[in-house]
Amino acid sequence: MSSVITKSLNDELERIPARKRTVFMYVFYAPIPLLIVPFILLRIGKWIDRRAGLKGILPKPLNYILAVLAAITSSFFLLWSWYCMVRIGKGHPFSQPDLNMQPSPSKLVTTGPFALCRNPQSFAGLMGFLSMALFSNSVGLLFAVFPAAAGCWHMLVRYSEEPGLERKFGEEYSDYAAEVPRYIPLIRRRTT
């Protein structure tokens, strides 16, 4: 069923010139995960804090220092992974393996941040979320909203993105997935 929907959507997308698809990506699609969703999640976290009478995670300025460190880590991994997807994979950072919105990488990228974890953009998002929670000093954001959002994101990656990569790159992706952790860099699977 989903493959029929994907094929139909791809047929429609192919009728739109590539330049218009790119403009759509940056004007309409990119702000959703980068600006709108974080704003909404922050508001929910602050609402939880007010309703539950929660005061904060850490004392100031420690929360700001840790927030800045998490933001720097997030930005570094995000930009590094985008660079590798474009330069090495010859694809677009906002691409999906089964959807022809933007060109997806034609080569499986396994170097740079992708040698540390399979989803460095997701790791960057996790660090960005942690930075936002620390900066706002929101207990609700960190301990209620974050796990729910991370769980939804994991479902998207696990059941949409990874099967698409496996279909596209086959055994090469399967071998890579067996060796490299999904989200957290440098945490290797124990082999027995």
Image (cartoon, rainbow, N blue to C red):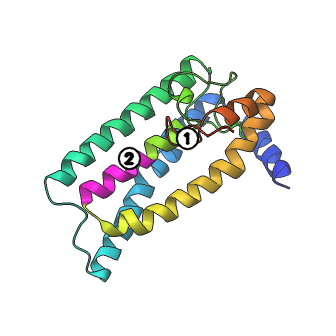
Q: Quadrant of the C terminus?
A: top right
List x then y, in percent, for residue 176: 68, 30
Dot 1, how many residues are within 10 Å of its Cα: few (below 14), some (14-19), or many (20+)? few
| Range of magenta residues | 126-136
List x then y, in percent, for residue 98: 74, 40
Tag 2, which secondary structure?
Answer: helix
Q: As shown in the figure, which amino acid type bears the numbered disc 2?
A: Gly
Side (left or right) of 188 relative to 43: right
Side (left or right) of 180 relative to 30: right
Side (left or right) of 188 relative to 178: left
Up/down of 160 relative to 136, above or below: above
Q: Residue at x 77, y 36 (%)?
A: 166
Query: Could you tell me what secondary structure mostly forms the magenta stretch?
Result: helix
Q: Earlier in the sequence, mark 2 or mark 1?
A: 1
Q: Is residue 130 magenta?
A: yes
> What residue would you read off at disc 1?
24
The answer to which image quadrant residue 103 occupies is top right
Up/down of 123 relative to 179, above or below: below
Q: Residue at x 70, y 48 (%)?
A: 160
Q: Is residue 147 magenta?
A: no
- The answer to whether residue 16 of the structure is visible from this angle is no
List x then y, in percent, for residue 78: 44, 34
Task: Give the mark toward the camera: 2 or 1.
Answer: 2
Q: As shown in the figure, which amino acid type bears the numbered disc 1?
A: Phe
The answer to which image quadrant residue 63 occupies is bottom left
Relative to the observer, which residue lies in front, 59 or 120? 59
Up/down of 12 relative to 60, above or below: above
- The answer to whether residue 102 of the structure is visible from this angle is yes
List x then y, in percent, for residue 18: 64, 29
> What residue would you read off at disc 2?
128
